Image (cartoon, rainbow, N blue to C red):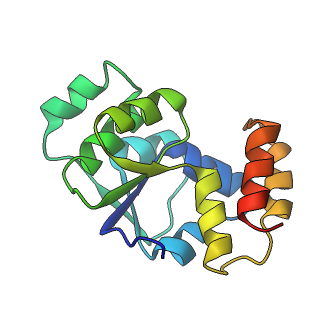
Amino acid sequence: MLKKYSVVIADTSCFILLSKIDQLDLLQKVFGSVSTTKEIAIEFKEPLPIWVIIQSAKNQRYHQLLEIEVDKGEASAIALALEDEDSLLILDDAKARTLATSLNLDFTGTLGVLLKAKQLEVISNIKPLLEKIQKTNFRFSERILNDILKEANE
């Protein structure tokens, strides 16, 4: 059974990567609504779809402290996630994921979003999307590729 989260917060890399492969709408199809922060919206540099909710963390001091560890967008997403114990972060940066782990936050990456889309039958095959991603500047190992394909039964 796939867990339902009250809020899903996407970081810039997720928007960029899904946009590059023309699959930004997968976020809405998988999660319904997705939140992000104004810092991430600025980093993305393109208009976000209307179903993306832009929010700010209430505790800006904590957000500023997080910026010591990770970039402004990731810090804003993590600060926002800390305000809802039933949140899911979509993070691809290793340092941000390490910080999220230390703060006991649930997270996935963009590739995890694709896998969830396959599990929910939003997409029929994940392999063509992974092949498109490999043509971008986003890098992942052969082991991760094989693990995802195995998990997706492809």
Q: Position of residue 57 (x, y in %)?
A: 21, 46
Q: Residue at x 41, y 72 (%)?
A: 33
Could you tell whether 116 is left or right of 146 in the image?
left
Q: Residue at x 34, y 49 (%)?
A: 37
Relative to residue 30, is residue 8 depicted above or below? above
| Residue 151 in view here | yes
Query: Residue 144 sits in which quadrant?
Result: top right
Could you tell whether 118 is left or right of 134 in the image?
left
Q: Position of residue 113 (x, y in %)?
A: 59, 60
Q: Position of residue 56 (x, y in %)?
A: 24, 49
Relative to residue 139, is residue 45 depicted above or below? below
Q: Residue at x 41, y 27 (%)?
A: 71
Could you tell whether 94 is left or right of 86 in the image?
right
Query: Residue 116 sits in which quadrant?
Result: bottom right
Nearer to me, 144 or 8: 144
Nearer to me, 113 or 25: 113
